[in-house]
């Protein structure tokens, strides 16, 4: 298939300004970029005037619930939700049932991904068997199948001595550790910030320091062992500042991510027990969202990741305490980030491309998607003037547990190309 | 405008609160008559769904419903194993088929009555959900205070004890502020959250709290069953620091303060025996007033009509 995209404005991670141009894609490669290109015979021509062409996004933190919880999501439905949101690659978390803690489990999900997903679907692996925090998982067996990220996501690896040994052992294989930071004795049992809302609702809260203590603990362990630590879904100001301080020292390999919901919402949005704002780590205060945004702009956060966590309508319709933690994000992330940050000029397209396309791929050791001659086609066409209404029908995830359900936001993912395939064409 | 449900105090307008408190007066007047019953809810059914043990609140609602001539059914859940969310939901679907007009629910999980209210046409009354809300307790407290001070604005109520786990503290402080009464909390630092509303003074020292010059001292029940997680070193130490001892009772008497308590009391912990005989103890008034305000609530709420 040959495709000529005319009059696009092209985004890159390197400059806030968009470059105008025509892009000719043939046989899955970007053949020519120029002005006034002529369409070869038989080529499909798209007039992209007013629209933005950017590299496909990459989400390094998703829950596809396979195996074990396929009523919530599957690799097939989750990867379609990603495509729907302009995301052309993901990393799955291993808190499935059984957990992804062995070469067998890794092989099984990768085989499912090969059969059911139209985008690269990578998986992380557990640090410990069954995410129980007791015995090391089959680390080298997973590495041999391409696993690089180790995490007991959903829980912290509670025993620091075990994590220390895992870092010494697997760090040598080029694997890195991703931490869900939560000191169990101090946190929970509910995903709710300790603050005005926990008081008002009468539910015991989880203080920010329960997260910050483990952020600091795990970076210290990485510092001591020389391993690479990646801090997941940071939700608090002091958590961000802790990472900033460690990065400023320059003697530890630390990366970090922030989730759109932690940038956009606070504990007060929970209102009267709205379970669509219940996730772990919890939403905190306005001071925290402002600090997280500044951390993203300053580069304390290397990447944006959604922590896409689907749950069925029944599960989320239960009372706040019983309902499970998590919100979906793949269908909505790019449009919501555009609507709330890029459109009002809070940050530019370059930040979005760097933090949600380039850096997550670098973290995973993958080639970065770039719109340049000779590169494989991995891109999306975004209309900043159109609107998207996130109806249940629009969502490709099996679940719709998102605050954005039935909201209309500015921006629309119109077209997604990956290699020779048109993954989305709306 | 009548509402379908009563789930908390925060969502009530001041006019609604005043209306309910006014409505409770004629109901209370009934209690001294030889016939205490009115036919207001004749033919209506009230279902009691108590997932947590309760003596006072349960019997108070039952008496209130019967004095309005409603039929009362007890759904025995306290001893059954249905405590999971799924089961609650299935229970409600069963109850819906029974076509109850009112469901009075108590549960240890904050927010559960609201979840039930969304699933049923019946009027749901929250009789206490975790540490979230206990709106009829708040109404009876406000009613009791207004019996002493018909215009209570500017009066001061000191709530003493375990604020952290108390739905009574939350709902009663909310209603008192709505009717112009000032509220302060007193208790151990571990049990008086710093994240409470800004317009509630927070004390951890008894003398400082008394210097605030309250008109009412409202004692909360110390949750004896929560002693597995320590919020203070011992009950003795609690009594010494925050309990109404005989010496403190003498001071309270000298100042003419009223004492309130939602019951049941722990003698020797939050109060000494002598408090029960104190002439300005309103503890028994609270019990009696509870029936009157619950009658007013039942009379006011209107279940969602069946379509067609």
Image: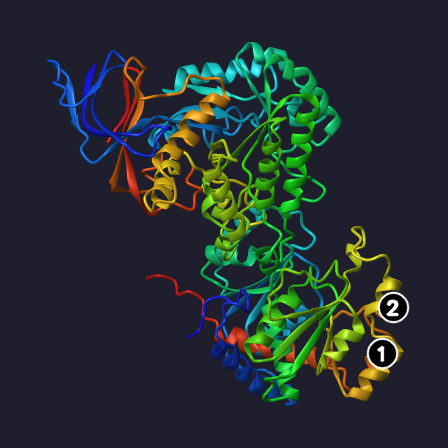
Outermost residue on the top side: it is A144
Percent x, y of residue A94: 56, 25
Percent x, y of residue B187: 75, 66
- Could you classify mark 2 by the number of other residues whose Cα lies within 10 Å: few (under 14), some (14-19), or many (20 or more)? some
On residue B240, which mark appears?
A: 2
| Sequence-earlier tag: 1 or 2 | 2
Q: Nearer the viewer, residue A259 or A319?
A: A259
Residue at the spot 37% in from the left edge and 28% down from the top edge: A14
Q: On what subunit does the disc labeled 1 rest?
A: B
Residue A268 in the image: above or below residue A67? below
| For the residues bearing labels 1 and 2, Cβ distance under 8 angstroms | no
Q: Nearer the viewer, residue A52 or B138?
A: A52
Percent x, y of residue B136: 60, 71
Q: Is residue A378 visible?
A: yes
Instruction: Find disc 1 in the rendering and name its residue.
Output: B248
Question: In the rendered view of the protein, which quadrant contains the C terminus of chain B?
Answer: bottom left
Q: Is residue B97 visible?
A: no
Percent x, y of residue B302: 45, 70
- Specify whether disc 1 shares its chain with disc 2: yes
Residue at the spot 83% in from the left edge and 71% down from the top edge: B243
Residue A391 in the image: above or below residue B271? above
Outermost residue on the front side: it is A249
């Amino acid at each position: 298939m040959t495709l000529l995209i005319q009059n696009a404005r092209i985004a890159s991670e390197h400059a806030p300004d968009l470059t105008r141009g025509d892009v000719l894609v043939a046989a899955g490669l970007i053949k020519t970029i120029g002005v006034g290109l002529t369409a070869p015979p038989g080529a499909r021509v798209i007039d992209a005037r007013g629209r933005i062409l950017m590299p496909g996004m990459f989400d390094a933190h998703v829950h596809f619930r396979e195996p074990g919880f396929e009523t919530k999501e599957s690799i097939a439905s989750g990867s379609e939700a990603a495509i729907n949101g302009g995301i052309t690659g993901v990393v799955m978390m291993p808190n499935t049932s059984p957990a992804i803690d062995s070469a067998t489990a890794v092989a099984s999900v990768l085989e499912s991904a090969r059969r059911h997903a139209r985008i690269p679907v990578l998986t992380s692996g557990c640090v410990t068997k069954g995410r129980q925090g007791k015995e090391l998982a089959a680390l080298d067996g997973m590495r041999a199948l391409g696993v690089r990220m180790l995490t007991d996501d959903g829980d912290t690896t509670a025993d620091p001595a075990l994590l220390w040994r895992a870092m010494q052992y697997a760090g040598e294989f080029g694997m890195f550790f991703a931490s869900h930071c939560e000191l169990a004795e101090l946190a929970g049992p509910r995903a709710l910030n300790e603050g005005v809302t926990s008081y008002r609702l009468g539910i015991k809260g989880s203080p920010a320091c329960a997260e910050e203590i483990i952020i600091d603990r795990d970076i210290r362990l990485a510092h001591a062992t020389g391993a690479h630590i990646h801090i997941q879904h940071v939700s608090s100001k002091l958590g961000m500042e802790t990472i900033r301080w460690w990065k400023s020292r320059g003697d530890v390999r630390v990366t970090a991510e922030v989730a759109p919901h932690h940038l956009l919402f606070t504990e007060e949005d929970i209102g009267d027990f709205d379970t669509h704002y219940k996730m772990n780590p919890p939403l905190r205060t306005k001071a925290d969202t402002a600090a997280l945004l500044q951390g993203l702009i300053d580069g304390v956060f290397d990447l944006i990741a959604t922590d896409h966590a689907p749950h069925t309508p029944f599960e989320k319709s239960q009372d706040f305490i019983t309902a499970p933690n998590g919100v979906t994000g793949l269908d909505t992330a790019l449009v919501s980030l555009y609507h709330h940050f890029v459109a009002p000029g809070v940050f530019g397209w370059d930040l979005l491309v760097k933090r949600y396309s380039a850096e997550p791929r670098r973290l995973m050791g993958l080639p970065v998607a770039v719109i340049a001659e000779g590169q494989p086609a991995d891109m999306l066409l975004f209309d900043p003037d159109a609107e998207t209404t996130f109806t249940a029908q629009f969502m490709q995830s099996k679940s719709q547990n998102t605050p954005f359900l039935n909201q209309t936001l500015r921006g629309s993912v119109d077209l997604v190309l990956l290699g020779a395939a048109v993954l989305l064409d709306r | 405008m009548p509402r379908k449900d009563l789930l908390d105090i925060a969502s009530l307008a001041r006019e609604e609160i005043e209306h309910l408190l006014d409505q409770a007066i004629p109901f209370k007047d009934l209690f001294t008559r030889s016939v205490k019953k009115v036919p207001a809810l004749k033919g209506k059914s009230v279902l009691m769904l108590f997932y947590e043990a309760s003596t006072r609140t349960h019997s108070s609602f039952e008496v209130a419903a019967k004095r309005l001539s409603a039929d009362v059914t007890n759904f025995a859940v306290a001893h059954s194993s249905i405590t999971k969310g799924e089961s609650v939901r299935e229970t409600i679907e069963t109850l819906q088929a029974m076509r109850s007009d009112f469901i009075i629910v108590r549960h240890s999980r904050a927010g559960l009555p609201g979840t039930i209210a969304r699933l049923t046409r019946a009027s749901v009354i929250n009789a206490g959900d975790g540490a979230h809300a206990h709106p009829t307790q708040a109404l009876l407290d406000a009613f009791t205070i207004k019996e002493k001070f018909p215009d209570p604005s500017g009066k001061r109520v000191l709530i003493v004890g375990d604020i952290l786990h108390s739905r009574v503290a939350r709902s009663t402080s909310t209603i008192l502020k709505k009717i112009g009464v000032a509220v302060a909390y007193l208790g151990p630092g571990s049990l008086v959250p710093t994240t409470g509303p800004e317009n509630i003074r927070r004390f951890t020292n008894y003398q400082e709290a008394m210097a605030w010059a309250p008109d009412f001292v409202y004692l909360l029940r110390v949750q004896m069953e929560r002693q597995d997680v320590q919020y203070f070193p011992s009950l003795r130490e609690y009594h010494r620091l925050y309990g109404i001892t005989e010496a403190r009772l003498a001071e309270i008497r000298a100042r003419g303060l009223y004492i309130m308590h939602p019951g049941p009391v722990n003698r020797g912990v939050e109060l000494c025996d002598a408090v029960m005989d104190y002439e300005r103890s309103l503890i028994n008034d609270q019990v009696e007033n509870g029936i009157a305000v619950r009658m007013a609530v039942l009379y006011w709420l209107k279940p969602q009509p069946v379509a067609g």
